[in-house]
Amino acid sequence: MSSNRVFIFDTTLRDGEQALAASLTVREKLQIALALERLGVDIMEAGFPVSSPGDFESVQTIARTIKNSRVAGLARAVDKDIDAAYEALKVAPQFRIHTFISTSTIHVQNKLKRDFDEVLAMGVAAVKRARNYTDDVEFSCEDAGRTPIDQLCRMVEAAISAGAGTINIPDTVGYTVPSEFGGIIETLFNRVPNIDKAIISVHCHDDLGLSVANSIAAVQKGARQVEGTINGIGERAGNCALEEVVMILKTRKDLFPNLQLNLKTPEIYRTSQLISAVCNMPVQPNKAIVGANAFSHSSGIHQDGMLKAKNTYEIMTPESVGVPTNNLNLTSRSGRHAVKHRMQVLGYGEADYDLDRLYEKFLKLADKKGQVFDYDLEALMFFDKLQDADDFYQLDFLSVQSGSGILASASIQLRAGGETRQEAATGNGPVDAAYRAIHRITGYDIKIVKYQISAKGQGEDALGQVDIVATYNGQRFHGMGLATDIVEASALALVHVLNHIHRADLIARKKQEIQQEKTAGES
């Protein structure tokens, strides 16, 4: 079913989320899903519903909310997985069940401990069961890159005959090189008799740094769906970075003259920034398309060429992927209209942020910094999206004292629901003292396993961003804080974690109550 349309299948919320230091909340996943919908991805894989109650809830919430992208759920070639995927997805106006089974000899013998004919029968049965629920079924041959070509052709033909409309050929361990992977796709088109009945998809990993190159080679040979993640996040070395594939196809139209994409490329940068912030996965400066240095020119020769003609050293414009300029045009004297106008210039609509909350934070920042940059506004907006107006814990007051030769101390005032609580503590530094004071207020047995500071902005006027990963009751939670002061940003990051924990405790108690009521009813 090769055509001129290339479908973009985003698996940031499934394959990407698997590799994070801390699981995302339902709210965070929905925030990413809405950004992906605005970006214009054709299909978004929202999760693996059978894997946990939390993943089921996330997939169901996203399926209920998203209208302009097709929502997919992953399922092994097992009845309960496929049934769970349907139950989570059936609230969506349009959805896809994505089922898979391993096909390489290594996986069949060592992981599944079956022979290939048994595996083929399981794959066919899975597709048929999924077709009972929807006519949009995708089937994946896991580790296709290392699968004997005869067996791969048999499996693809059988899955299409069973009713799969999309066949995915994953390079699951990033083993192949472009000529080899392109050859696999070409062979399938030449040898599978019913190949014209399905869209051929590819899902490449980056273990050898070839995921994007392999995906492009597959498109050249007729694949018409590319799977990957924003910023290339994912298992091990990551997945194919979708923003790179899209911009290759857009920039090199001389090589791909007739291919069509739905993706809105000016949304790429802010989607990348949002996912980086929510997932606590910084983008390296030299990352293609979305890295901080992607459109920077340091060499004198390059700068001279750029001044004469931008295309001497830029093959695409920053504006084409939504990279904003940094203007110094806002101060504490700027009104709401100025902030709203600046957000419009940056490409954000009124539905993307709460103007009242953003303006309140803007004024506080402007009083501290004097001038507020575009990247400051965006940082405030993204940070605001990670908070709820009704957070149980909110930081009211922080005062620290530290210096050479003295013991660091901190005084904290937190709002906890309708109650205000105060505490003070000493520590081996101002952040440690602040954290000890917060622990005294909440009583949570939290362990900080990762603490990271980064700058949001440029030079001495940059905002400080603190990201922490903390463990509590065997679960990992990510918290982020943003402020001009690193100690304040650190305290806000811990408060962010506390609110995650508070919500998790509420959910756990509610589930326990439901179970107790159910048990009482049965007795």
Image (spheres, rainbow, N blue to C red):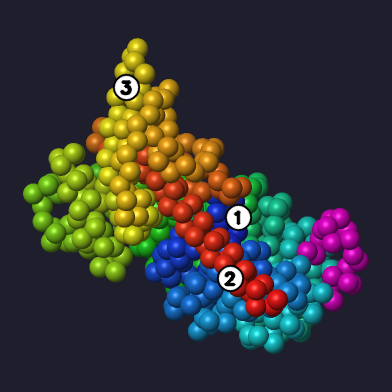
Dot 3: element:
strand
Dot 2: element:
helix
- As measured in the structure, the alpha-carbon distance from the residue carrying label 1 to the one carrying label 3 is 40 Å
- Of discs 2 and 1, which sits in the foreground? 2
Residue 135 in percent (x, y) is at 64, 86
- As measured in the structure, the alpha-carbon distance from the residue carrying label 2 to the one carrying label 1 is 29 Å
Residue 493: quarter of image: top left
Q: Identify the amino acid type marked 2.
A: Ile
- For the point 78% across and 64% down, which residue is it? 102
Residue 492, above or below 65: above
Determine which of the numbered discs, if any, sits on residue 18 in the image.
1
Query: From this viewpoint, which residue is outermost toward the left?
Result: 333
- For the point 66% across and 64% down, which residue is it? 51
Q: Label 3, on which residue?
A: 402
Q: Is residue 269 visible?
A: no
- For the point 75% across and 83% down, which residue is it? 128
Residue extent of the magenta highlight: 102-121
CB atoms at circles 2 and 3 under 8 Å apart? no
Determine which of the numbered discs, if any, sits on residue 514 in the image.
2
Direction from residue 427 to residue 203 in the image, left or right: right
- As measured in the structure, the alpha-carbon distance from the residue carrying label 2 to the one carrying label 3 is 49 Å
Q: Is residue 401 visible?
A: yes
130 or 237: nearer the viewer: 130
Residue 60, above or below 111: below
Q: Identify the amino acid type marked 3.
A: Ser
Residue 411 in percent (x, y) is at 31, 33
Packing grade of label 1 (10 A; few <14, some 14-19, many >=20) is some
Mark 3 or mark 1, which is nearer the start of the sequence? 1
